[in-house]
Amino acid sequence: MSAPIHDVFMLFGDSITQGAWEPGLNGFGQRLTHVYNRKLDVLNRGFSGYNTEWGLPVFEQCLAKTSDKNVPKLRILAIWFGANDACIKPSPQHVPLTKFVSNLKQMVDMIKSPTSAHYSPTTRIILISPPPVNTHVRGAALAQRDPPLALDRKFEITRAYAEAVRDIAAAEGIAFVDVWTALWEAAGKNEEALTEYLGDGLHLNANGYSVMYDELIRTIEKEYPEVHYNNIAPVFPPWAEIDWEHPEKSLYIGNDKA
Amino acid sequence: MSAPIHDVFMLFGDSITQGAWEPGLNGFGQRLTHVYNRKLDVLNRGFSGYNTEWGLPVFEQCLAKTSDKNVPKLRILAIWFGANDACIKPSPQHVPLTKFVSNLKQMVDMIKSPTSAHYSPTTRIILISPPPVNTHVRGAALAQRDPPLALDRKFEITRAYAEAVRDIAAAEGIAFVDVWTALWEAAGKNEEALTEYLGDGLHLNANGYSVMYDELIRTIEKEYPEVHYNNIAPVFPPWAEIDWEHPEKSLYIGNDKA
């Protein structure tokens, strides 16, 4: 059995989160695991293809109850949805904008509401907006499938979902990483130029993750500096700080052995 | 609080484990996190500079007790030490070979012995041998420090620690990944050619991790095929398999909600 020696940084989202450790991409999951090593466990809770409707029951199960013993504290929670919710009908992934908003709010409430079984007032929540979609590239890729598929997303619709995430964050007073705007501006507000950041028109490539990671770290630094990796001490001491004559003095972190 | 929805793949070791998510290296930690996504949580339990003597009390705390509730199962455990234990006196990292062997056995016993508080007969244990050391590169690096340091490791001594790991694995009947031999053979049994796999003479670079990862996956495939990533189902279903009309039917994995 694995003991909860580290608190947790949970990355909850869709394929853009699930793929954030993929070789060659330098994704934000991999980079967070690296910079938070010996401090927080960064957990991959990305679910390819999921929208907030399917994510909601999964999210509930990713959370322990406030009363549970032996479970790690959730120090930071990033929630990144919208890329699939913003699919247009008849896609089964489509979630109406008002439902998307209420689903995201419900996730936030599960952490923030004192009456929630998962109430965790010390958890730092970060909402992330979906990236813009490059409908040229996405449309061409779908048209080449066998059988060919119609375009399933629209540029302006995804933008509306991104803006909704921004509004929820503002209303709830929680941190917001505006990936939509960061990538849109990086591409010079030119949909075709998004190719540099979204290889297939939908998923971030190495350049896209690089922009996103920088925004995320800047946001943590500004909004939640106490959980920036530079401000969390490693759970176990650096080796040069161990008392070499009496290592047990510095190496038992609980109070039952020290 | 974070719920234990995934079982755990724990990577326990020194800096070569701690650095296994470092950008640009394609380390085995990052790659395992990717291939086991939605199946197992791959946890970084690497402690730079640590030997088995300091690792032992840390290891004990990384393990929950068999009787603990709400803790994730330890499905796979990789133990990778020796690179620091094999330091020569007067290095404070030096651990005598016989003590190194008894420390490693004690770690294995903590999992395998029915009388251990951490007994876990279903955990698949993998022992990994330390890489060979390139004393030319390591010596030059230490000589350039201010003040200059003497060489702290010897080629044949590290080899002896690697062989000891192999012998423990054989005696205990557990899987063994022979990184020492894999890198030595990749370098054509030429110490100076190890530079291609160990940038600083000690730590694996991208080429070194690539050789190591392939050996590790081959070992899992052969010795513990039931925990190869291809043979573990994702905890939550792929999105195309969700019952879109009644998503709750497929999305509650426990039995209290279904």
Image (cartoon, coloured by chain):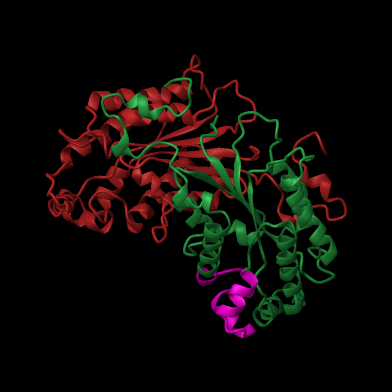
Chain colours: A red, B green
When the figure is inspected, residue A37 is found, relative to residue B20, above or below; the finding is above
Does the image show residue A190? no
Residue at the farthest right position: A245
Question: Looking at the picture, how far across and down is residue B219, in whole percent?
Answer: 56, 61
Nearest the viewer among B64 and A200 is: B64
Q: Give the answer, above or below, for where B20 lies relative to B121.
A: below
- In the picture, the quarter occupied by the N terminus of chain A is top right
Q: Find out whether residue B209 is within the magenta segment.
A: no
Depth check, front residue: A158 or B79 = B79
x, y (%) of residue A183? 28, 49
User: Along the horizontal axis of the image, is A210 left or right of B5?
Assistant: left
Residue at the outermost top position? A115
Residue drawn 73% across the image and 40% down it:
B118
Q: Is residue B75 above or below residue B216?
A: above
Q: In this view, does A216 lie to the left or right of A183?
A: right
Q: Can residue B164 be seen in this view?
A: yes
For the point 63% across and 46% down, which residue is it? B123
User: The magenta stretch spans which residues?
Assistant: B179-208
Which quadrant of the view contains residue B14? Answer: bottom right
Q: Where is residue B77 in the image (x, y as percent from the top left)?
A: 63, 50
Q: Residue at x 47, y 46 (%)?
A: B232
Residue B200 sits above or below residue A174 on the image: below
Q: Where is residue B185 in the image (x, y as percent from the top left)?
A: 59, 79
